[in-house]
Image (cartoon, grey):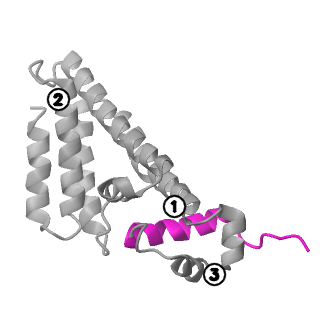
Amino acid sequence: MPWEKTFEESDVIEKTMALFWEKGYAATSISDITAATGIKRGSLYNAFHGKEDLFLQALLKYDNERRRKMLRQLESLDDPREAIYRFFDRIVETSLSDPHRRGCMLVNTSLDYAQHTEAAREVVTAAFKELTDFFERLIARGQTRGDIPKTVDPVATANALLSFLVGIRVLGRGVVEQAALEQMADSAKCLIG
């Protein structure tokens, strides 16, 4: 008798995204996944070819629904400086509003970069590149408008802003409190004047 799928793949990806985000890739077992999704091990392997494939799909879902969505919204703002300010305000707010203090799934994955498949590493690398490109574009636009000083180096500043983002998301997992996260965001904002 052929295998028949009795679940929605998108539901499984959603549930496992939450699980991987909470526990991380290494700490999440196949048993954890089957318990969270309610599907059997064989069905999981038939549909997703295993834990690595499922993690990759969960990571892509996270990236599309969170990072990319936020960048699209912010890039549509008329004022590039305000877009960068709002970016860091939102990062602090997101870090603090998560009762589980999970941080960012992309940043968390980057912390264990060498342990992941090439495909997962490519997702993280591309996401970070898109973030620095986003900052560079906004800085250049702000300089053209006269809102950001010409003395600000777009490439170096974009890289520094990425480092602030990573720092806030890592430390926002519970290491530091709200005031410290807000100070870090304010320091990031100072880089663009």
Say above or below: 123 vs 57. Answer: above
- Relative placement, left or right, of 140 versus 191 is right
On the image, numbered disc 2 is attached to which residue?
156
Q: Residue 106: tell me if it is visible.
A: no
Which amino acid does the dot numbered 1 rest on? Answer: Phe
Say above or below: 143 vs 162. Answer: above
Q: Position of residue 89 (x, y in %)?
A: 22, 51
- Classify 10 Å Cα crowding around label 1: few (below 14), some (14-19), many (20 and above): many
On the image, numbered disc 1 is attached to which residue?
55
SS state under label 2: helix
In 3D space, how far apart are the residues under numbered discs 3 and 1 (Cα atoms)?
17 Å
Identify the mark nearer the N-term, 2 or 1: 1
- Relative placement, left or right, of 138 versus 11 is left
Which mark's residue is nearer the viewer, 3 or 1? 1
Say above or below: 25 vs 70. Answer: below
Give the quarter of the image for residue 138: top left
Q: Which mark is residue 38?
A: 3
Q: Nearer the viewer, residue 173 or 41?
A: 41
- For the record, the magenta segment spans 1-23
The residue at the far right in this view is 1
Q: Which quadrant does the N terminus fall into?
A: bottom right
Identify the mark nearer the N-term, 3 or 2: 3
- Relative placement, left or right, of 5 versus 193 is right
Give the quarter of the image for residue 31: bottom right
Q: Which mark is residue 24?
A: none
Can residue 89 be found in the magenta stretch?
no
- Classify 10 Å Cα crowding around label 3: few (below 14), some (14-19), many (20 and above): few
SS state under label 1: helix
Q: Position of residue 74 (x, y in %)?
A: 34, 39
Can residue 9 be found in the magenta stretch?
yes
- Classify 10 Å Cα crowding around label 2: few (below 14), some (14-19), many (20 and above): few
